[in-house]
Image: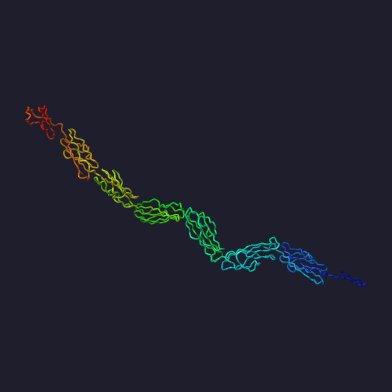
């Protein structure tokens, strides 16, 4: 209650004065101070409505700030509003004064946590890479604006976190591989109240081997794929296949033993790169070559044989080119020659000597196979002699074969026997001294042809006659004697035709006469003279014994029409049959000889013929 004391002092200046006194009776059951529950707020909010315990008058409560900031609308109102809070923890005290009661002065604190809306979301920091033997590091989580909190937790791998709430906590005892940590940021009632982020700490093995792409490979179509054999990697080291040259589809670029498909014919090169992080052998690379050979590539072809004439001793080869990564190689297997580039199908070869020089073009198609082709370079001698078939030969049946005697050409010049006339079989027509069989009776003509390549005397030939005589050839027959009368002084002979190859020839033995063709059995004979003209027909049957040379004679009688007529002499009287008489006819005048013959004009009985002359 309130009592007023009034003093009246009459007319004095302070004539009437008063004063009041309050008598406050406190409630011993008045609530002790309770500041209410803590509060979480987020900017831009900076004020809050408080909820402290109420008081029973005359008890009074009072708000005060002991940490942070804030301005109370009514310091004594348990439900007052506080403004101007600061980001962080604002600690307010609610003090209740209950006078002389036992619970006279009580107080309670209240924390209002004002979170910063701009507090960054969780960021665990960049991933880290370490190399043994280093097994510890410092984390780098995003900073916090209090009252936001952050917490580190281990997700996978190992690691001892020194201070889980420290964004920059140390972590130790990491193991080889990936060690994953979670940084969780709690920002109270803000829009992003809980955010998280992961960080990986990769601990690399300093014993991880350097990159090794494995051995080169050779494969043959139709296969167009291969399995790689790269060196193994210890995680977190990683290997990566890359196509360097050629073509190919890598199934798994990070698998040491990946399959590669779609390889192209030729050279396909791949690199295997191992990234071992911060270790000494951080980045190592090795290449492997996969050569795909073409099963359908043509086999080796050295091109046609070639011919030169000395002193020319150089050629350009014409081997077929290898397909893809197949390799061709020239080698000399006969003769000599300097191969300028053994792997060039069109290489020059010089210094080739006279003769046959053989070169092999070998096509190495690896797993698809090896093929070879041999060609010859023939260098001919310009001084090689012309063809000489040797001397003619004469044989007599039953012999029907002989050996030839042609000259031997300087190799690679060659010779060849051919039949020009007659018959003959050569078992080896290229042999200068070849045997020839099955000769026929008559003239067998053979040609020996030598070929000297591109030299000036390239083709020369010579013929030889092998004459086979028949030992059953008939004897020489000059034909019958002939008679002609002047003025005729020529005639045609009628010798028996010789059986070839025997030959006949006319010769004059006595008398006169011009033989038009001495070898013609029916030759014309001119300029015969009156009288007896004797001719010899000689038959030559070669080597046939015993009648190799045979002769026969015939006579041509040439009469003179001016010779005297026949005159038997004077007439004689008859005589007895047994009597004889000498006649006295006239003789033909010399040089003409004409035969005379007696004949009875009237034969006596018994009749008889009188001998002529």
Q: Quadrant of the N terminus?
A: bottom right
Task: State the residue in front, 600 or 515.
Answer: 600
Task: State the residue in front, 137 or 68.
Answer: 137
Residue 263, image x and y in percent?
50, 54
Inspect this view and state whether residue 212 appears: yes
Query: Above or below — where is 350 with respect to 565?
Result: below
Residue 344, image x and y in percent?
42, 55
Question: What is the quadrant of residue 185 in the picture?
Answer: bottom right
Q: Quadrant of the C terminus?
A: top left
Question: What is the quadrant of residue 4 in the picture?
Answer: bottom right
Query: Above or below — where is 334 with respect to 34?
Result: above
Question: What is the quadrant of residue 7 in the picture?
Answer: bottom right
> Could you tell whether 161 is left or right of 543 in the image?
right
Residue 129, image x and y in percent?
58, 65
> Could you tell whether 204 is left or right of 485 in the image?
right
Residue 480, image x and y in percent?
19, 36
Number of numbered callouts drawn:
0
**Residue sitting at the far right:** 10
- What colour scheme governs how the chains and residues are painted in the rendered image of this protein? rainbow
Inspect this view and state whether residue 516 appears: no
Query: Above or below — where is 552 with respect to 53?
Result: above
Q: Residue at x 19, y 33 (%)?
A: 488
Query: Above or below — where is 460 with respect to 282?
Result: above
């Amino acid at each position: 209650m309130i009592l007023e004391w009034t003093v009246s002092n009459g007319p004095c200046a302070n004539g009437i004065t008063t004063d009041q006194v309050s008598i406050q009776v406190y409630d011993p059951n008045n609530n002790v101070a309770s500041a209410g529950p803590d509060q979480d707020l987020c900017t831009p909010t900076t004020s809050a409505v408080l909820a402290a315990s109420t008081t029973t008058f005359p008890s009074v409560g009072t708000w005060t700030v002991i940490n942070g900031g804030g301005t109370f609308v009514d310091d004594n109102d348990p439900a007052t509003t506080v403004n101007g809070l600061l980001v962080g923890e604002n600690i307010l005290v609610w003090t209740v004064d209950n006078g002389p009661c036992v619970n006279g002065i009580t107080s309670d604190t209240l924390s209002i946590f004002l979170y910063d809306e701009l507090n960054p979301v969780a960021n665990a920091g960049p991933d880290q890479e370490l190399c043994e033997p280093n097994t510890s590091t410092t984390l780098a989580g995003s900073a916090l604006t209090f009252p936001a909190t952050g917490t580190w937790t281990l997700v996978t791998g190992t690691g001892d976190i020194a201070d889980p709430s420290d964004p920059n906590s140390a972590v130790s005892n990491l193991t080889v591989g990936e060690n994953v940590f979670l940084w969780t940021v709690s920002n109270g009632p803000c829009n992003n109240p809980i955010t998280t982020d992961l960080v990986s700490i990769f601990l690399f093995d300093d014993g991880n081997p350097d990159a090794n792409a494995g051995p080169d490979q050779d494969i043959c179509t139709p296969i167009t794929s291969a399995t790689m054999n790269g060196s193994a990697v210890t995680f977190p080291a990683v290997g990566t296949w890359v196509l360097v040259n050629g073509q190919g589809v890598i199934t798994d670029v990070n698998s040491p033993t990946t399959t590669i498909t779609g390889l192209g014919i030729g050279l396909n090169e791949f690199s295997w790169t191992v990234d071992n992080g911060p270790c000494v052998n951080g980045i190592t690379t090795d290449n492997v070559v996969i050569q795909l050979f073409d099963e359908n590539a043509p086999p080796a072809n050295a091109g046609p044989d070639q011919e030169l004439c000395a002193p020319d001793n150089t050629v350009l080869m014409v081997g077929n080119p290898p397909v893809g990564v197949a390799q061709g190689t020239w080698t000399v297997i006969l003769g000599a020659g300097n191969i300028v580039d053994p792997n060039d199908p069109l290489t020059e070869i010089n210094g080739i000597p006279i003769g046959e020089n053989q070169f092999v073009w070998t096509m190495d198609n690896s797993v698809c196979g090896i093929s070879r082709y041999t060609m010859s370079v023939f260098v001919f001698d310009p001084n090689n002699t012309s063809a000489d078939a040797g001397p003619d030969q004469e044989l007599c049946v039953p012999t029907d074969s002989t050996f030839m005697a042609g000259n031997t050409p300087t190799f690679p010049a060659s010779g060849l026997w051919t039949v020009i006339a007659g018959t003959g079989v050569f078992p080896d027509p290229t042999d200068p001294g070849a045997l020839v069989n099955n000769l026929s009776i008559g003239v067998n003509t053979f040609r020996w042809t030598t070929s000297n390549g591109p030299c000036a005397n390239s083709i020369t030939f010579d013929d030889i006659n092998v004459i086979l005589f028949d030992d059953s050839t008939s004897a020489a027959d000059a034909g019958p004697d002939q008679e002609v009368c002047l003025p005729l002084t020529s005639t045609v002979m009628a010798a028996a035709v010789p059986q070839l190859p025997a030959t006949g020839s006319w010769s004059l033995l006595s008398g006169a006469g011009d033989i038009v063709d001495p070898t013609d059995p029916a030759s014309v004979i001119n300029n015969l003279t009156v009288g007896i003209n004797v001719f010899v027909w000689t038959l030559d049957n070669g080597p046939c014994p015993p009648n190799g040379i045979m002769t026969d004679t015939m006579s041509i009688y040439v009469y003179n029409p001016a010779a005297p007529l026949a005159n038997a002499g004077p007439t004689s009287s008859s005589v007895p049959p047994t009597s004889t008489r000498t006649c006295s006819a006239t003789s033909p005048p010399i040089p003409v000889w004409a035969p005379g013959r007696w004949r009875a004009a009237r034969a006596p009985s018994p009749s008889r013929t009188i001998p002529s002359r």
